[in-house]
Image (cartoon, rainbow, N blue to C red):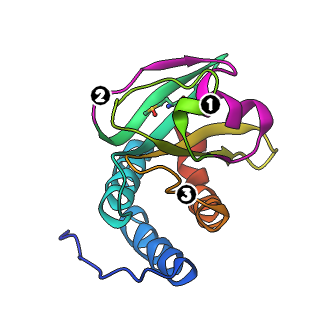
Amino acid sequence: MTYQEIAYPAEKTAFYTLLLEQLQAYTAAAPTPVAALANSAAVLGAALSDINWAGFYLVRGESLVLGPFQGKPAVMVIPDGQGVCGAAWREKKAQVVDDVHRFAGHIACDCLSRSEIAVPVFAPDGAVRAILDIDSPLPGRFDADDAAGLQKVAALIAPFVRET
Ligand code: SME
């Protein structure tokens, strides 16, 4: 399989439509859940502009555990409710953080990160099974349109997360 480079549009609705198509293509034949999540992190890392980390934290008991990602090495275990990812898990709601330095309890992995979005990945019963987390070196990189687009991404990859 050769990765197909796409000129992504700046307009976010069109961007996320293309992104979902590409994610579908690079996960459809995944032989294992990890393969699907690894390719998803790679597609997100290649497609999104101005980001320095994109990947998954998987719910394991009372913690979030590092899954496939693109970026610098990151914290491997996030206890329940801690950090931006823990807030997304606890509140079952996407967290859009314009300035991570102003988010009490933010867990710094890459000191270049300035803004962040964390989106829950839900099981069919409504439980959070993982968090899709993306960091940017720019303040205010993410908005409500990104949250809406990435919630669709989370829904697309949810079946793979259930199987890990
Ligand atoms: N900043 C996150 C931790 C994960 S790293 O950004 C990859 C948090 O506060 O939950």
Q: Residue, x 27% and y 34% (percent of image)?
A: 72
Give 129 or 16, whichever is nearer the viewer. Answer: 16
Of the numbered discs 2 and 1, the one sitting upstream in the chain is 2
Q: Position of residue 42 (x, y in %)?
A: 31, 55
Q: Is mark 1 within 8 Å of ligand 1?
A: yes
Q: Which mark is residue 73?
A: 2
- Left or right side of 130 for 135: left
Q: Which region shows up in magenta?
A: 72-96
**Which residue is the site of mark 3?**
142
For the residues labelled 2 and 1, the Cα–Cα distance comes to 21 Å
Q: Which mark is residue 118?
A: none
Q: Is residue 95 magenta?
A: yes
Give 95 or 114, whichever is nearer the viewer. Answer: 114
Local packing at callout 1 (Cα closer than 10 Å; few below 14, some 14-19, many 20+) is few
Quadrant where the image shows the N terminus: bottom left
Cβ–Cβ below 8 Å for labels 3 and 1?
no
